[in-house]
Amino acid sequence: MIDPFQESIGLLAAILTTSAFVPQVYKLYKEKNAQGVSLTMYLIMFIGVLLWLLYGILIGSIAIIVANSVTAFLQLLVIIFKLKNS
């Protein structure tokens, strides 16, 4: 079992790093223009986040599971906006 103090540090890191994607998603939604977004970067990042999610599931870390689930969803939104609005 993971130490609760360590897990709380992971959850705080998860909140901060995951929330960093929210302004990009909001901007793309609002402006309906994804011309400056790198599809390749987001696809690579999305695959990496899915692997982190799998890792979190394998080791049973709530912080890693939650962070990467939400991040994967936000990155998927960016990818969809890019494909629809480029």
Image (cartoon, rainbow, N blue to C red):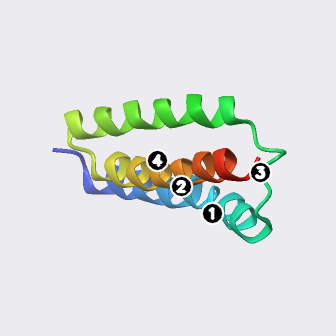
Nearer the observer, 66 or 31: 31
Q: Which mark identifies residue 22? A: 1
Q: Position of residue 6 (x, y in %)?
A: 35, 50
Disc 3 packing (10 Å; few <14; some 14–19; many ≥20): many
> Residue sitting at 46 percent across and 37 percent down?
49
Percent across and percent down for residue 20 are 64, 57
Instruction: Give, as a three-letter code, the residue at label 3.
Output: Ala
Q: For mark 3, give the secondary structure.
A: loop
Q: What residue sits right under mark 4 in the picture?
A: 72
What is the distance, in whole Å, between disc 4 and disc 3 at their CAs?
A: 18 Å
SS label for mark 2: helix
For the residues labelled 1 and 2, the Cα–Cα distance comes to 7 Å
* Residue 19 drawn at (x, y percent): 58, 61
N-terminal of the pair, mark 1 or mark 4, is 1
Residue type pointed to by label 2? Leu
Q: CA distance from mark 1 to mark 4?
A: 12 Å
Q: Are marks 1 and 2 in contact (CB under 8 Å)?
A: yes
- Residue in the image at 48% along x and 60% along y: 12
CA gap between label 3 and label 2 equals 14 Å
- Contact check, label 2 and label 4, Cβ < 8 Å: yes
Residue under label 3, please give it. Answer: 34
Tell which circle, 1 or 2, labels the residue nearer the N-terminal end.
1
Labels 1 and 4 touching (C-beta < 8 A)? no
Q: Which residue is mark 2?
A: 74
Is residue 83 toward the left or the right of residue 72 in the image? right
Quarter where residue 18 is shown: bottom right
